[in-house]
Image (tube, helix red, strand yellow):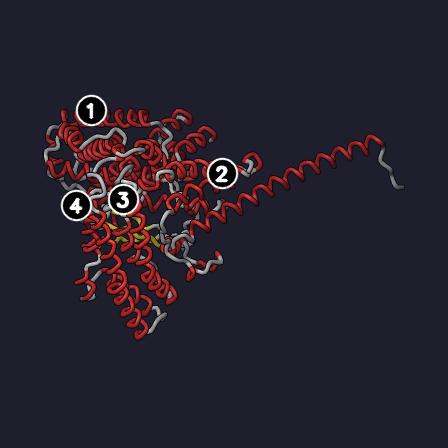
């Protein structure tokens, strides 16, 4: 017999259906909002990725998977008056982001939304002062960066070779655009000093040494030929094809790239005299405001200038007092330190990296989905002699996000004398520093389905702060290597670490003094003299470097201190600072960063 529903049963069924429909409708809109936001994030990612063909080639191993034709990508060329466009573009981006209601997004998308809001806001504040930036900086600017990127450009196929040669053809237009920008800087009264201009002019001549190019001994010729040999050995090109490519590379470097560098040097020579003496940003109208915005953008710290100073002062005083106590208790340490005594066993850079990779396993999580089928490879290379004066002590070449297993660390022998210097540098660049953090983040994002946009948002304070945290932690690993044969290793490496921290903290403070407070060379020499410096040339070089590279030292050391402040807060929230705590804290940082420290603090209290 067919049963009919009673009135109460009908009412209950309708209520259930209404509830189900409301839930379905809510979930639909929730999912729809997520889908829209993820499309927005992917479009943003693809636009950023395709803005520069060199960066694209470093970021993506398989462009077909992204449906991108790499051949159509061109080097960005600056045109007159475009400096103001960044402000407008960021404003449009901010308006597009404001169309999303974060309450309707998933937890992961809400986190990315929050990151984008703070990131775009910070970028907009610096973009409002376009002519304060310096793309030709002697230490980290385009003239020295471009040859390194070209020397490491992947040539896996004949098509890659064609792309590479096409980029060489685009370099004159790219440099001409930078000349236009420098002319606009000069018109705004913000051109570099004559001293800085002379450094860049000298770089242009030395990096594109015409005698080396004509004798086929330039490193861009030698490294290109080595990559061609690998293609030949793999059977991907014939010997005649290799010789033809080699000849074309030599022709382009000699007749296209070198003249473009010469033209850049000539134009800078003409602009000399339009800038002020080497000085900090505070000496320029609007310089303090720009520095405040740049400091936030570069470090990710949300603290005010006074609070940052206090944080740095406390750390400097604490480390200085610890060093004084250590030396008072062991006077022989000072002489040992001045001699830069070698305590570590003889090890190659590759052996040091292998040791560090094994040593960190107790306190640092394994890289997600790292398998024997795809083991992490890391080649250690040495910076070419011609590039040594212009590059950092070491640097890590970030691998493509879709093929992270082949990695390269460059060592500058000019700045890594001594075994402990090399050991801590490899920790900074390798394990548990940049290499480890990059691979962990990329694999964690892939495993958790995180949008690839995270990979193009640069948080210098987190990235370099983490690497500094890794470097300073590595002194403990050095003790474990050396103490069996050298019982004094613990005190000696503690002294080395304190000296390193005092130096970096002092330079970070000087950065603020020069660029925000307007400290002069004389002021800086007085400060350095109070810390024992006696060489006027060395003190002048320190002043010049900091004046030319605003926020560089804070990016490293303030970033490190922000991580240490997070560590204190985590210890108060979670309990004792033991091995289990360290493991959990490192997981927290690796899975939520890179990010600004304001966002990380909020995430910590939600964890």
Task: Tell me how far mark 1 sits from mark 3, CA to CA.
Answer: 46 Å
> Are discs 1 and 3 less than 8 Å apart at CB?
no
Tell which of 490 and 471 is nearer to you. Answer: 471
Q: Which mark is residue 321?
A: 1
Q: How crowded is mark 1: few (under 14 residues within 10 Å), some or many (20 or more)?
A: few
Question: Which quadrant holds residue 121?
Answer: top left
Q: Is mark 3 on a helix, strand or loop?
A: helix
Q: How crowded is mark 2: few (under 14 residues within 10 Å), some or many (20 or more)?
A: many
Q: In which quarter of the image is the N terminus?
A: top right
Task: Tell me how far mark 3 sits from mark 4, CA to CA.
Answer: 40 Å
Q: Of callouts 2 and 1, which one flags the residue occurring earlier in the amino acid sequence?
A: 2
Task: Tell me how far mark 2 sits from mark 4, CA to CA.
Answer: 45 Å
Question: Which quadrant holds residue 282?
Answer: top left
Tell which of 448 and 526 is nearer to you. Answer: 526
x%, y% of residue 50?
42, 53
List the single residue furthest toward the bottom: 240
Q: In this view, does 463 lie above or below 374?
A: above
Disc 3 target residue: 186
Disc 2 target residue: 113
> Which mark is nearer the camera, 3 or 2?
3
Q: Of callouts 3 and 2, which one flags the residue occurring earlier in the amino acid sequence?
A: 2
Give the residue displayed 36% in from the left and 32% down from the top: 301
Disc 4 target residue: 417
Q: Residues within 10 Å of mark 3 (few under 14, many from 20)?
A: some
Q: Is residue 23 above or below residue 527?
A: below
Q: Is mark 1 on a helix, strand or loop?
A: helix
Query: Does residue 375 appear in the picture of this structure?
Result: no
> Which mark is nearer the camera, 1 or 3?
3
Question: Which quadrant holds residue 457?
Answer: top left
């Amino acid at each position: 017999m067919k049963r009919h529903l009673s009135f109460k049963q009908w009412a209950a069924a309708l209520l259930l259906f209404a509830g189900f429909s409301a839930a379905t409708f809510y979930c639909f809109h929730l999912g729809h909002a997520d889908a829209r936001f993820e499309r927005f994030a992917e479009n943003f990612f693809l636009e950023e990725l395709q803005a520069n063909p060199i960066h694209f080639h470093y970021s993506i191993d398989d462009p077909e998977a992204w449906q991108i034709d790499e051949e159509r990508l061109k080097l960005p060329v600056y045109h007159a008056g475009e400096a103001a466009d960044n402000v407008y573009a960021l404003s449009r981006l901010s308006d597009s982001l404001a169309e999303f209601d974060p309450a309707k997004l998933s937890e992961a998308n809400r986190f990315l939304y929050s990151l984008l809001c703070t990131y775009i806001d910070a970028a907009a504040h610096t973009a409002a002062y376009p002519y304060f930036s310096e793309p030709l900086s002697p230490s980290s600017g385009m003239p020295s960066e471009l040859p390194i990127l070209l020397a490491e450009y992947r040539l896996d196929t004949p098509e890659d070779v064609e792309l590479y040669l096409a980029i060489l053809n685009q370099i004159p237009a790219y440099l001409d655009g930078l000349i236009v920008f420098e002319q606009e800087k000069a018109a705004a009264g913000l051109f570099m000093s004559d001293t800085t201009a002379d450094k860049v002019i000298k770089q242009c001549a030395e990096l594109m040494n015409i005698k080396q190019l004509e004798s086929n001994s330039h490193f861009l010729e030698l490294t290109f030929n080595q990559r061609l040999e690998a293609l030949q050995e793999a059977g991907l090109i014939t010997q005649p094809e290799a010789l033809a490519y080699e000849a074309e590379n030599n022709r382009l470097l000699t007749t296209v790239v070198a003249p473009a560098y010469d033209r850049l040097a000539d134009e800078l020579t003409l602009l000399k005299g339009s800038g002020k003496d080497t000085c900090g940003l505070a000496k320029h109208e609007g310089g303090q405001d720009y520095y405040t915005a740049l400091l936030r953008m570069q470090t990710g710290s949300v603290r005010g200038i006074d609070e940052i100073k206090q944080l740095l002062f406390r750390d400097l005083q604490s480390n200085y007092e610890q060093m004084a106590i250590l030396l008072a208790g062991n006077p022989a340490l000072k002489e040992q330190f001045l001699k830069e005594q070698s305590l570590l066993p003889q090890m190659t850079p590759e052996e040091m990296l292998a040791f560090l990779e094994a040593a960190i396993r107790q306190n640092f999580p394994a890289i997600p989905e790292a398998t024997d089928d795809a083991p992490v490879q890391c080649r250690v290379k040495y910076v070419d002699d011609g590039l040594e004066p212009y590059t950092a002590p070491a640097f890590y070449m970030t691998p493509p996000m879709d093929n992270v297993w082949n990695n390269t660390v460059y060592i500058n022998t000019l700045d890594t004398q001594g075994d402990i210097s090399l050991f801590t540098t490899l920790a900074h660049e390798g394990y548990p520093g940049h290499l480890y953090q990059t691979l962990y983040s990329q694999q964690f994002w892939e495993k958790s389905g995180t949008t690839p946009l995270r990979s193009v948002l640069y948080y210098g304070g987190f990235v370099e702060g983490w690497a500094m945290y890794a470097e300073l932690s590595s002194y403990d690993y050095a003790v474990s290597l050396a103490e069996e044969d050298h019982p004094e290793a613990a005190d000696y490496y503690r002294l080395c670490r304190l000296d390193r921290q005092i130096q970096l903290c002092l330079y970070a403070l000087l950065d603020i003094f020069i660029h925000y407070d307007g400290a002069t060379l004389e002021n800086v020499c007085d400060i350095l003299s109070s810390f024992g410096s006696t060489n006027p040339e060395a003190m002048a070089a320190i002043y010049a470097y900091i004046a030319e590279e605003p926020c560089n030292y804070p990016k490293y050391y303030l970033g490190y201190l922000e991580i240490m402040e997070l560590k204190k807060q985590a210890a108060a929230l979670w309990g004792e600072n033991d091995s289990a705590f360290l493991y959990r804290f490192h997981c927290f940082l690796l899975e939520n960063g890179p990010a600004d420290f304001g966002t990380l603090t909020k995430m910590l209290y939600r964890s």
